[in-house]
Amino acid sequence: MTEKTYFYRKLFSQDFEASGHEKTVIPVRLKNKFFQRNVRFDSQAKKWLDFDGILPEDETHFAAEFVETPVFPKAPAPVNSFSFKNNRPGLEDLSPSDMKVYLNYRRNLAKANLNAVLINDQDLISKDYFGAVFESDDKALTFRLTFLKFDRAKNKVLPELPEDVFFSSEEFFFSIKDGEFSTNIEIKEGYSESRKKDESKNFSDIERFFKEMEVQYPKKILSLAYEKLLLLTRKFTKLKLTTQVLSDESNKSDETRNILLEMYKLLRMPFEPNLYPVIFSREFQKSKRKFSYNRKNSRILKKFLRKMKLKDYRTLRKCFAERPETLLTCLRLKDAGFKDLNLFNRVIENSTNREVIDLYSRESLVFFSNYSIKKRGEIATMNTLLRGYEDLWEADDAMRMFADYFKHIPEELRKDVLTDGFTHFNHDALSNLTYRVDNENYTFEYTKKQKSLEDDIDGYEFRLPETSWQMCEIGTALHNCVASYAKPVRNNECTIVYARKDGEYKICIELRETGKGYTPAQERIDRNASPTAEQKKILNLWHEKHRISQMPM
């Protein structure tokens, strides 16, 4: 059974009201400084009549604001030294006939500017779109979205004459069962040379079409249409689908989502719906894999596994049913060089292990694993990946550095990583190495006043870093960004002092020189934490001894 729902724009508003029946539109022009009275368009008489604001009482009519077409006048040819367009000096020298031409031009220009503003609502959507119709068939699983609008292509465009009013519609038809889409709007093929610079060559005509059409329609209507189409999709798939099925787009706000494109993507939902978040995930798209399918194919999962060269077995299907993204995890493991199904199961059957593998950067995971498997085998490599690292983000960072700076890593450090994994120690070693590769090492020159800051107090050695690379070493040990201060130190914009105890870096201090001497800008320990009570006592002694101001509150 076909169900129709109508929406009509409220007068003086960007909002739409739903209606269970069709209404007749009464175009209304509202008075302004160029139009001295409110009028309505009589469709039978084909002319504008006075409008007192009263509509028929049968609730089958509604008033829609019609704005005069903004027609920008062409500037008359210059007269002598006067340019009508630029309004250059010499206005007082115009003849009466030229002055009349000028004033008429300025009036029409102001009128066009006003209409150009009035023609859009507060959401910058054209008021020409005065209505919409949802037509859905729950049995046939079809949905038609129709926008009702004033047709300016047929309206007269001469500002000195009253305009006739014509109507048109823009339709989008979706068939969930057949996976078909059609529209009465022309979809242009290809794209211009200028677009090639800004858009991917893989950006299809249909995607570009939806991107261009999206911005001109009321978002509220699009959102309601999407919800209706999603209900039909749920009936087809027998699943409780939510907007999350479309991953990236559905997490955005309605202001930034391309809802029309999402509606089109629902038509591509395969017979096995759980494949949808896999095939259309960002990771699958970035992997440049291609998978074409007939959405009605009941063996589509088997075809996908065969195409991706993944073994089809019971455990995989069970995990896939519980979590479709399991296939993406398996593709990661396959690309990383793993073949042992026991290792696949060790990952996909354990949520913690799966989260670890999914967290790693795909490119660095593939690089490290392929290298490690050749050296130590699959089991040892998997043990390295799944070690109980204290900080998984740090382990991922270390793996990225291992892949990106591999040719600079000495053999001894490579062996340490293969044997011990991405430990805190190896992360610091890799971080130190990458800094040295990317940055020039230079020795700092200090004044006598700066050198006097060095001291030994109760086992704490206060020292100035000798080189930029040592600053990297300090930053790595204390997990801070002090390495980025190398240039300011070199340019005497600040002074860095570190305190070491028992051979380990404990405190990092940034000093700024003022007219009264040195003032601490920062005094931090590991991970930018504040000094301990004991360390504060040591710092106070150092302050007093070297006449350094206390940290500002």
Image (cartoon, helix red, strand yellow):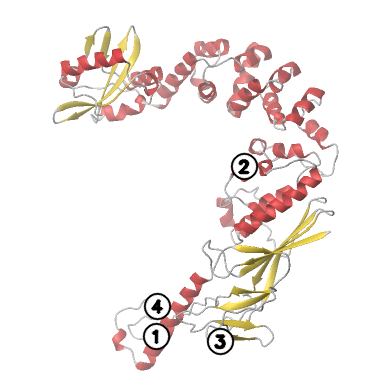
Marks 4 and 1, how far apart in space? 12 Å
Image location (x, y in percent) of residue 387: 59, 14
Residue designated by label 1: 103
> Sequence-wise, which precedes: disc 3 or disc 1?
1
Alpha-carbon neighbours of circle 2 within 10 Å: few (<14), some, or many (≥20)? Answer: few
Residue designated by label 3: 161
Secondary structure type for disc 1: helix
Q: Hey, what amino acid is under mark 1?
A: Leu
Residue 381 is drawn in which quadrant?
top right
Marks 3 and 1, how far apart in space? 19 Å
Q: Residue at x 68, y 20 (%)?
A: 350
The reply to whether the C-beta atoms of the residues labelled 2 and 1 are less than 8 Å apart is no
> Sequence-wise, which precedes: disc 2 or disc 1?
1
Vertical side of 95 occupied by 335: above or below: above
Marks 2 and 4, how far apart in space? 48 Å
Residue designated by label 2: 248
